[in-house]
Amino acid sequence: MVQTYPTLASTFTVGQSYEKRDMKGLKISSSKLTTKRDGTPINKKKAVWWDGGIHAREWISPATVIYIAHALLSNYSTDPTITHLVDQFDYYILPVFNVDGYSYTWTKDRLWRKTRSKTIIPLCYGADPNRNWDYEWCKGGASHDPCSDTYCGSKPFSEIETKQVSNFIGANNDSIVHYINFHSYSQLWMSPWGYTTKPPNDFKLQDDGSAQAVDALGAVFGTQYDHGNIGATIYIASGNTVDWTYGTAKVMFSYAVELRDTGEYGFLLPEDQIVPCGQETLAGVLALLKYIEQHVYA
């Protein structure tokens, strides 16, 4: 994509994984000035961060993130909505967060979830990178057992992958206003909190954005998503990514999205659903971006 769209796309590296793989991302940025609703130019663009594959077995999430990135690039200058939104925001896109685990699902265990770091128990590898963040860490919906799929790690940010991403977001939190952590499966569009069933004070602002997204998504193929805060909508999950991006990094519009399906195929979603999932999710994120734009560039 960088070779095809060199004026818009560039690569960046967050760091290296436990097994020394590059955590490589794609940055999309146009040279156009951002503008307020009245057309007044703004010198400092706000930014978006999207990632997929934090859980290794959730293959549809990297595929969907890549589909959306390609759609933004390939439709720039021909689709007015996409052109406008690419001009309004910088995009940091990390298709595969958990690169070691993802590689392991292709070579050894298709349903592997965690990272691949060593633990205190020789035959139990990895921590859950979505329970390893330093916000209400391991308070519920997470385990201190290294053999558990929801092992929260030996300490917050014990995993080099979560540490690298948190450092990047923290260093750019003056510009990043929107975050999505893509997962599968369940068809849910969720906002904080995950450590409790209680929503935060900003819940209505966040959830109204979710409602915009799921309405636009559903209009494409009729796929139905529910929305709400993580703890009340799916389950308690402390130390999760979205609680940290909102609670610590102050990224207001932080979301966890569970993609197709609702259980018929689960993690083993057929190939013929990859493109439709990308198409409908693109519609959802575009609607959400338009909603966010109204609030951050008022």
Image (spheres, rainbow, N blue to C red):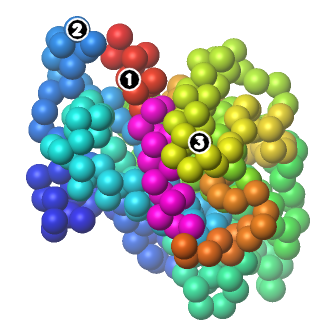
Image quadrant where one finds the N terminus: bottom left
Disc 3 to disc 1, how far (Cα)?
Answer: 21 Å
- Residue at numbered disc 2: 38
Mark closer to the chain start, 1 or 2: 2
Report the span colored magenta: 273-288
Label 1, secondary structure: give it.
helix
Residue drawn at (72%, 78%), measured in percent from left and top? 111
Vertical arrangement, residue 63 with respect to residue 110, above or below? above
Mark closer to the chain start, 3 or 1: 3
Q: Residues within 10 Å of mark 2 (few under 14, many from 20)?
A: few
Residue at the limit of the structure toward the bottom, as seen here? 107
- Residue at numbered disc 1: 293
Q: Magenta stretch containing residue 174, yes or no?
A: no
Q: Amino acid at mark 2?
A: Asp
Asked whether 102 or 227 is in front, the reply is: 227
Disc 2 to disc 3, how far (Cα)?
Answer: 31 Å
Residue drawn at (68%, 44%), measured in percent from left and top? 224
Asked whether 218 or 61 is in front, the reply is: 218
- Residue at numbered disc 3: 218
Asked whether 292 or 246 is in front, the reply is: 292
Q: Residues within 10 Å of mark 3 (few under 14, many from 20)?
A: some
Residue drawn at (66%, 33%), measured in percent from left and top? 191
Q: Residues within 10 Å of mark 1 (few under 14, many from 20)?
A: some
Q: Magenta stretch containing residue 279, yes or no?
A: yes
In the rendered structure, the answer to whether residue 115 lies left or right of residue 27 reads right
